[in-house]
Image: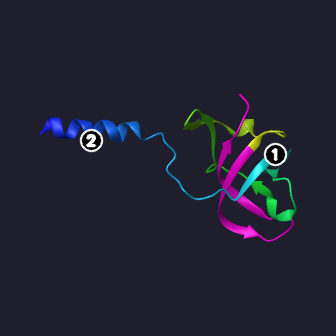
Amino acid sequence: MPRILLPFLAALVACTDVPTTSELPFVEGTITLRTRAGFVVDGGGDCTTKASLWIDSHTRVLRRAGQYLVAADTGQLLPGRRVQVWIGGIVLESCPPQAGATRVVLQDGP
């Protein structure tokens, strides 16, 4: 019985760091402004490709390390960084839209 479970457990452990979400980010682009409460992302087009995002203690900031995502911190959310952002909760329909960031993935940099 242990011989049957061992390959299954090894496969399960190997997959824990692989991103599993298939949902698309709310916005992808470059941070153009950083404030204490959040940041603005510009996707390079009109209002629909931009967003003003607030962060809180529940916001997860991650960075790519090969095929994996590893923890980063909000101090790395600086103007010029390319990011992908997922949101949660309400979206204020303004130009650009405003929302709370639940997950931010840093696309480049240290």
Q: Find residue 8 and name its label.
A: 2
Coordinates of residue 57 in the picture (x, y in percent): 64, 48
Q: Residue at x 88, y 62 (%)?
A: 46
Magenta-drawn stretch, dominant element (helix, strand or loop): strand
Could you tell me which quadrant the C terminus lies in? top right
Q: Residue at x 76, y 55 (%)?
A: 53
Q: Amino acid at mark 1?
A: Ile
Q: Amino acid at mark 2?
A: Phe
Comparing 79 with 55, the one in front is: 79
Q: State the extent of the magenta-drawn residues as a range.
A: 83-110
Q: Residue at x 17, y 40 (%)?
A: 4
Coordinates of residue 105 in the picture (x, y in percent): 66, 44
Binning the other alpha carbons within 10 Å of mark 1 as few (below 14), some (14 to 19) or many (20 upward) gives: many
Q: In the figure, is residue 78 to the left or right of 101?
A: right
Q: Find residue 55 and name its label.
A: none
Mark 1 lies on residue: 31
In this orientation, does residue 28 appear?
yes
Between discs 1 and 2, the one toward the N terminus: 2
Comparing 52 with 28, the one in front is: 28
